[in-house]
Image: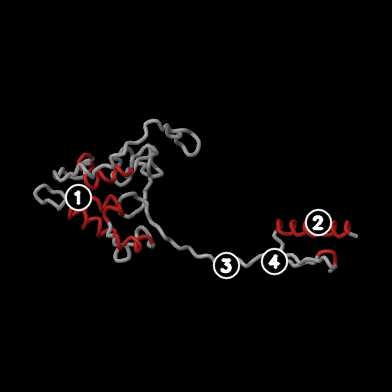
Amino acid sequence: MKRTIIVLAALAASGLGLAACNGSSTSVPFNGGSAFATPLPTNPTTPAGSYVQIELLARPAVKEALENFNDHKTTNAVEPYAGAPADPLFAEIKSTEDTLRPPNSSLGTDYGAALQSVLYPNEIAVNLGSTTNASYLGVETGGATGGTFGGRDLGDDVINISLGALFGNTLSKLGVQKDDGEENACISQQNTPQRASQAKIAAFPYLSAPH
């Protein structure tokens, strides 16, 4: 008798496992309603999902350096091209940069406006028709950063490129703006050199382990 109970219990467990794998949602008792019958569980109802955006950070250092901290939550929840007033980033790129590097009419410089045209919307653009190598801000600068494909290459030091544009002479070197003499060497680079020992490889993660 004990052997029979054990066998029946094992079969019941096996039946449940098979039903769970094939996704059946029908409740069927095992062994015709015997004392060991166990109805199969029904699949839970899938709740209607909703997409909730909690972060928007396509361009490293841009929001952190140029946006009012209290506005981060607002811009994290909007589309990158929402525009004002839903997205205050566009206006704050210029207002913050103007405080650091005011427009100079005699030189014909307006770094804030130039950065608006390059750094907004907050997304990384690529030109799929280009045959050049990937280069950060390549589309926005017409290839001045190394190629017209855009995106970002594994070797691009994105933070240094961004800080150089905000506080250094990157834009003047690219011919986007004249040199206004307002560079700040302390904050125009992150001062953390890339690991020269990391080489590009063909397989993911496409960079060798640093050593």
Q: Residue sitting at 43 percent across and 33 percent down?
A: 200
On screen, residue 6 above or below 131: below
Residue 34: give x, y in percent of width and height. 85, 67
Which label is found at residue 42? 4
Q: Alpha carbon of mark 4 to alpha carbon of mark 2: how far?
A: 21 Å
Dot 3: what SS?
Answer: loop
Looking at the rendered image, the quarter that the C terminus falls into is top left
Residue 106: give x, y in percent of width and height. 8, 49
Instruction: State which tag comes first along the sequence, 3 or 1.
Output: 3
Q: Alpha carbon of mark 2 to alpha carbon of mark 3: how far?
A: 33 Å
On screen, residue 184 above or below 112: above
Crowding around mark 4 (Cα neighbors within 10 Å: few <14, some 14 to 19, many 20+) is some
Residue 151 or residue 27, whichever sits in front:
27
Among the 4 quarters of the image, the one containing residue 197: top left
Looking at the rendered image, the quarter that the N terminus falls into is bottom right
Instruction: State which tag comes first along the sequence, 2 or 1.
Output: 2
Crowding around mark 2 (Cα neighbors within 10 Å: few <14, some 14 to 19, many 20+) is few
Dot 1: what SS?
Answer: helix
Question: Which residue was labeled with disc 3?
Answer: 47
Q: Nearer the viewer, mark 3 or mark 1?
A: 3
Residue 193: give x, y in percent of width and height. 32, 36
Indicate the amino acid at tag 4.
Thr
Question: Which residue was labeled with disc 1?
Answer: 111
Question: Which residue was labeled with disc 2?
Answer: 10
Q: Nearer the viewer, mark 2 or mark 3?
A: 2
Indicate the amino acid at tag 2.
Ala
